[in-house]
Amino acid sequence: MKQTETFVEKLYECNRHKTKLLTTCEKLEKHIPFTAKKYAGINPELSSFIDQMIFRFSKLQDTMGDKLFPAILELMEEEVKSKPFIDRLNRLEELELISKNDWLALRKERNEIAHEYSFNQE
């Protein structure tokens, strides 16, 4: 597959996740912010929207980090296969395409939510 096709395919995939994520956020908007009491009383339908939001956010981040970012760098004829992820992030930040610190902070939040939200209602 050509580099341009790979990039377009991954961008399309990211947009699909983003669209689903935004739709889910609209469904949850009137319930936010969640308190421990509100969270304890959510119905299965609302719970499924929360799960969907976490899933789509995780998939969006995974697709961007694992596929879209390398595709961008490959389009620019940069060597990416032998570089660790942090070096890719640094390069994208040098190009002013992302903020490495923002990306890493979002990644940390994503991991905490994905692993703790069902166990720690606070």
Image (cartoon, grey):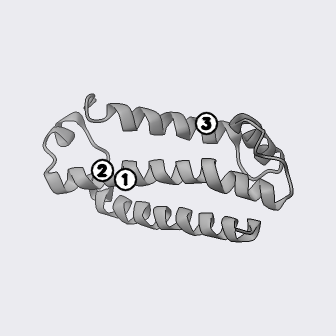
Chain-order first, disc 1 or disc 3: 1
- The quadrant in which residue 35 appears is top left
User: Residue 46: x and y, percent?
Assistant: 21, 54
Distance (Cα) linking label 1 and label 3: 19 Å
Location of mark 2 (residue): 50
Q: Amino acid at mark 2?
A: Ile
As rendered, which of 41 and 56 lies closer to the eye? 56
Q: Are marks 3 and 2 in contact (CB under 8 Å)?
A: no
For this view, does 96 lie left or right of residue 32? right
The answer to whether residue 46 is above or below residue 122 is below
Residue name at image x 52 percent, y 33 percent: 108
As rendered, which of 24 and 59 lies closer to the eye? 59
Please give the count of numbered marks on the rendered protein.
3
Residue name at image x 61 percent, y 48 percent: 66
Residue name at image x 80 percent, y 61 percent: 75
Q: How crowded is the residue under tag 1: few (<14 C-alpha within 10 Å), some, or many (20+)?
A: many
User: Residue 91: x and y, percent?
Assistant: 80, 44
User: Residue 57: x and y, percent?
Assistant: 45, 51
Q: Amino acid at mark 3?
A: Leu
Location of mark 3 (residue): 104
Location of mark 1 (residue): 53
